[in-house]
Amino acid sequence: MTGISTGELASRIIDYSNGSDHPDLLVYRRDIESHNWERFGWWIRLIAGLGNFYGDKRILEIGCGFGWEAAALSLETGATVVAMDILPSMIDGVQQCLDAAKARGETLKVEALVGDVCTVDLPPASFDGMFSSEAVEHVHSLELMYDRCFTLLKPGGRLVIANDSNAYNDEFRTRNMAMWPERDESWEHAEWLATEVRPVEHAGTKPYGAMREEMIRAVQPQLSGEDMKKLVHATAGLVKPEVEAAAAKFVADGTLPVRPELSWCRNPETGEYAERLLDPFEMVDGLKKAGFKVGIQHSFRRFPLTWLNHMPIRAVSKLIFRRKALFLIVAEKPA
């Protein structure tokens, strides 16, 4: 077991994050500056332990952002961590941080990779372990992700998923459901994303509803304003071919699709979700279907609440999730 002190971990990650002037990194850097480093160190050690990531191993991070958790996990465990994100702008920032560290004479066992976890073209059994923190709520197909992860993991390897976009948590339901109409309808919100959040990623961004309207007008230009409004609303959560098919069906027989309650805020071009709400128990079932042995737990840090972390009673876990959204799923590929 390698291990790193909390103080050294904080210093190394701050240095890492200052290694890039990428415009999309700035909002993340503000988060780093206000970090609770004691909790961060605990978090990295928790993920490392749950995944059995220590030693000369190769680990994949799914949805790495700008890669500081990948760097921290490598520093803690000694493993090589492949930091993968679907967005080239994210990986540009990761690579700049890694290059800056190398120029300082510091070697980080982190590799940057642009890739979609649902389709990434890598050899089977490429990784000893995988993890994803606060990213899978954006993945366009969890089922494809589970299958791909199963293929890419070595037998006995573990996938650790951590997320707080929890459908059972009142606070997150309220927050996300308040954000979704803005992302779907507001040009002001789209401009805020492009100027204040991540200007490279969100350059030229449009409300998702405006994107669907363009798609519908391209195939059904004769629709009235009222019919267009109905279709734009009803097709939220669909991708372009589905939007076009729904428009044709509406013209043919007046039928409208029903928006999914927990996952309708979605980019109709890419399929990426804007922080959809996840059902941890449905995720467990999906991972089991893909072939994994799966466990779910909570994230209490202090006794006596820690005894609730492995609560086997689903009804009790749902009550806990109402107050504490974060959930951890550990999925192991049978040896």
Image (cartoon, rainbow, N blue to C red):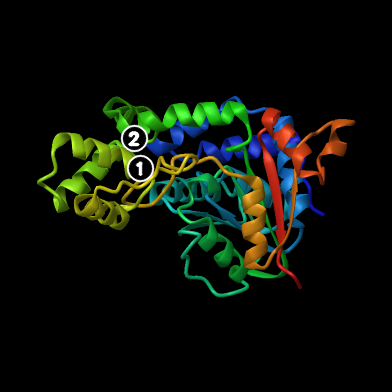
- Going by the image, does 102 lie left or right of 45? left
Q: Nearer the viewer, residue 129 or 23?
A: 129
Residue matched to label 2: 184
Q: Is residue 165 above or below residue 35?
A: below
Percent of width and height locating residue 211:
25, 43
Q: Tell which of 153 and 195 is nearer to you.
A: 153
The spot of residue 129 in percent (x, y) is 67, 61
Residue at 64% in and 60% down? 287
Q: Nearer the viewer, residue 231 or 331?
A: 231
**Residue 207 visible somewhere in the drawing:** yes
- Which one is in front in this view, the residue at disc 2 or the one at disc 1? 1
Q: Tag 1: Cα neighbours inside 10 Å, few (<14), some, or many (≥20)?
A: many
Image position, residue 85 (x, y; %):
48, 52
**Residue at left 62%, top 58%?**
286
Indicate the quadrant containing the N terminus: top left, top right, bottom left or bottom right. bottom right
Numbered disc total:
2
Give the residue displayed 35% in from the left and 52% down from the top: 270
Residue 141 screen position, x and y as percent: 48, 56
Q: Provide the secondary structure element on which disc 1 rests.
A: loop
Q: Residue furthest left?
A: 222
